[in-house]
Amino acid sequence: MTKHTLFVCKSCAFSSTQRDYMGQRGGYHLLTHLLRLQPQWTLASEYAIQSVECLSACNRPCVVAYAASHKTTLMFGDLPPLQSATAILQLAEQYHASSDGLVLRQERPDILKKGILARIPPLPDC
Protein backbone atom coordinates (compact mmCIF):
# COMPACT_ATOMS: atom_id res chain seq x y z
CA MET A 1 0.00 0.00 0.00
CA THR A 2 1.12 3.56 -0.70
CA LYS A 3 2.78 5.48 2.09
CA HIS A 4 0.85 8.58 3.09
CA THR A 5 2.28 11.90 4.20
CA LEU A 6 0.91 14.49 6.58
CA PHE A 7 2.68 17.79 5.92
CA VAL A 8 2.74 20.26 8.83
CA CYS A 9 3.80 23.87 8.33
CA LYS A 10 6.15 24.68 11.20
CA SER A 11 6.20 28.42 10.44
CA CYS A 12 2.48 29.06 10.97
CA ALA A 13 1.43 31.63 13.54
CA PHE A 14 -0.13 30.49 16.80
CA SER A 15 -3.39 32.32 16.02
CA SER A 16 -4.71 35.10 13.82
CA THR A 17 -3.71 37.61 16.52
CA GLN A 18 -0.65 35.94 18.08
CA ARG A 19 2.46 34.95 16.14
CA ASP A 20 4.22 32.95 18.89
CA TYR A 21 3.25 31.17 22.08
CA MET A 22 5.86 30.41 24.74
CA GLY A 23 8.56 31.54 22.32
CA GLN A 24 7.53 29.20 19.48
CA ARG A 25 5.32 29.42 16.42
CA GLY A 26 1.95 27.67 16.34
CA GLY A 27 3.19 25.23 13.72
CA TYR A 28 5.93 24.10 16.09
CA HIS A 29 3.36 23.40 18.83
CA LEU A 30 1.07 21.51 16.44
CA LEU A 31 3.95 19.42 15.08
CA THR A 32 5.10 18.63 18.63
CA HIS A 33 1.61 17.42 19.61
CA LEU A 34 1.32 15.26 16.49
CA LEU A 35 4.74 13.69 17.03
CA ARG A 36 3.85 13.00 20.66
CA LEU A 37 0.69 11.12 19.58
CA GLN A 38 2.30 9.29 16.65
CA PRO A 39 3.89 6.32 18.52
CA GLN A 40 0.50 5.18 19.88
CA TRP A 41 -1.37 5.89 16.63
CA THR A 42 -2.66 2.84 14.76
CA LEU A 43 -1.45 4.21 11.40
CA ALA A 44 1.99 5.33 12.55
CA SER A 45 3.73 2.94 10.16
CA GLU A 46 1.55 4.07 7.23
CA TYR A 47 2.18 7.81 7.59
CA ALA A 48 5.17 10.08 7.51
CA ILE A 49 4.57 13.25 9.52
CA GLN A 50 6.71 15.74 7.63
CA SER A 51 7.44 19.26 8.80
CA VAL A 52 7.81 21.88 6.08
CA GLU A 53 9.09 25.44 6.28
CA CYS A 54 5.99 26.96 4.67
CA LEU A 55 2.76 25.91 2.97
CA SER A 56 2.08 29.50 1.79
CA ALA A 57 -1.06 30.12 3.80
CA CYS A 58 0.61 32.69 6.00
CA ASN A 59 -2.52 34.73 6.68
CA ARG A 60 -3.96 31.73 8.57
CA PRO A 61 -2.83 29.93 11.70
CA CYS A 62 -1.72 26.31 11.46
CA VAL A 63 -1.89 24.56 8.12
CA VAL A 64 -1.57 20.86 7.27
CA ALA A 65 -1.83 18.86 4.04
CA TYR A 66 -2.61 15.20 3.43
CA ALA A 67 -0.96 13.59 0.41
CA ALA A 68 -0.47 10.16 -1.18
CA SER A 69 0.18 8.83 -4.65
CA HIS A 70 -2.93 8.62 -6.83
CA LYS A 71 -5.00 10.60 -4.32
CA THR A 72 -6.24 14.17 -4.14
CA THR A 73 -4.08 16.25 -1.80
CA LEU A 74 -6.13 18.05 0.86
CA MET A 75 -4.86 21.20 2.60
CA PHE A 76 -6.48 22.70 5.71
CA GLY A 77 -5.83 25.89 7.65
CA ASP A 78 -7.16 27.83 10.64
CA LEU A 79 -6.27 24.96 12.97
CA PRO A 80 -5.71 25.84 16.63
CA PRO A 81 -2.34 24.26 17.43
CA LEU A 82 -3.11 23.08 20.95
CA GLN A 83 -6.52 21.53 20.15
CA SER A 84 -6.21 20.02 16.65
CA ALA A 85 -3.79 17.08 16.77
CA THR A 86 -6.30 14.33 17.58
CA ALA A 87 -8.76 15.52 14.92
CA ILE A 88 -5.94 15.81 12.36
CA LEU A 89 -5.00 12.17 12.98
CA GLN A 90 -8.67 11.13 12.77
CA LEU A 91 -8.94 12.78 9.35
CA ALA A 92 -5.65 11.12 8.37
CA GLU A 93 -7.32 7.76 9.05
CA GLN A 94 -10.30 8.73 6.88
CA TYR A 95 -7.97 9.96 4.14
CA HIS A 96 -6.02 6.69 4.31
CA ALA A 97 -9.22 4.66 3.95
CA SER A 98 -10.44 6.73 1.00
CA SER A 99 -9.59 5.39 -2.46
CA ASP A 100 -9.30 8.89 -3.97
CA GLY A 101 -8.35 11.01 -0.96
CA LEU A 102 -11.69 12.75 -0.69
CA VAL A 103 -13.50 12.81 2.64
CA LEU A 104 -16.98 14.31 2.73
CA ARG A 105 -17.27 17.47 4.80
CA GLN A 106 -20.00 16.05 7.05
CA GLU A 107 -17.82 13.01 7.83
CA ARG A 108 -14.74 14.98 8.90
CA PRO A 109 -13.97 15.78 12.56
CA ASP A 110 -15.69 19.04 13.56
CA ILE A 111 -12.53 21.14 13.66
CA LEU A 112 -11.80 20.14 10.02
CA LYS A 113 -15.26 20.73 8.56
CA LYS A 114 -14.16 24.28 7.76
CA GLY A 115 -10.80 25.63 6.77
CA ILE A 116 -10.17 23.58 3.65
CA LEU A 117 -7.75 25.64 1.58
CA ALA A 118 -7.11 23.36 -1.39
CA ARG A 119 -8.05 20.13 -3.13
CA ILE A 120 -5.20 19.34 -5.51
CA PRO A 121 -5.88 16.54 -7.99
CA PRO A 122 -3.42 13.67 -8.20
CA LEU A 123 -0.77 13.80 -10.88
CA PRO A 124 -1.89 12.08 -14.08
CA ASP A 125 -0.21 8.78 -14.88
CA CYS A 126 2.46 9.39 -17.50
Image: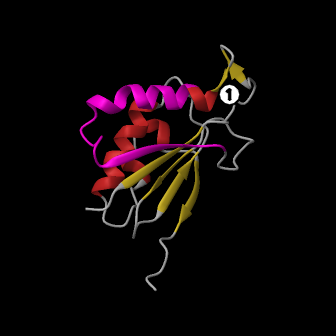
Label 1 SS: loop
Q: Toward the viewer: 85 or 8?
A: 8
Which residue is more in the foreground, 66 or 80?
A: 66
x and y percentages locating residue 49 in the rendered image: 44, 42
**Horizontal relation, residue 120 to residue 54: left or right:** left
In the displayed structure, 7 sits above or below 121; it is above
Magenta residues (range): 29-53
Position in image of residue 67 (x %, y %): 45, 57
Residue drawn where x is 64% and y is 49% of the image: 55
Identify which residue, 95 or 28, lies in the foreground.
28
- Amino acid carrying mark 1 in the image: Ser
Position of the N terminus by quadrant: bottom left
Residue at the spot x=49%, y=60% of the render? 73
Mark 1, residues whose alpha carbon is within 10 Å: few (<14), some, or many (≥20)?
many
Horizontal side of residue 112 vs 20, given as left or right:
left
| Side of 27 where 34 appears, left or right | left
User: Residue lying furthest top in this view?
Assistant: 22
Q: Nearer the viewer, residue 35 or 58?
A: 35
Q: Position of residue 107 (x, y in %)?
A: 36, 48
- Residue bearing the label numbered 1: 15
Rendered position, 42 above or below 57: above
**Image quadrant of residue 34?**
top left
Q: In the picture shown, does residue 89 fall above or below 57?
A: above
Residue 51 inside the magenta-drawn segment = yes
At a point 48% along the width and 42% down the height, the residue shown is: 112
Q: Within the image, what quadrant is residue 17 found in?
A: top right
On screen, 11 above or below 33? below
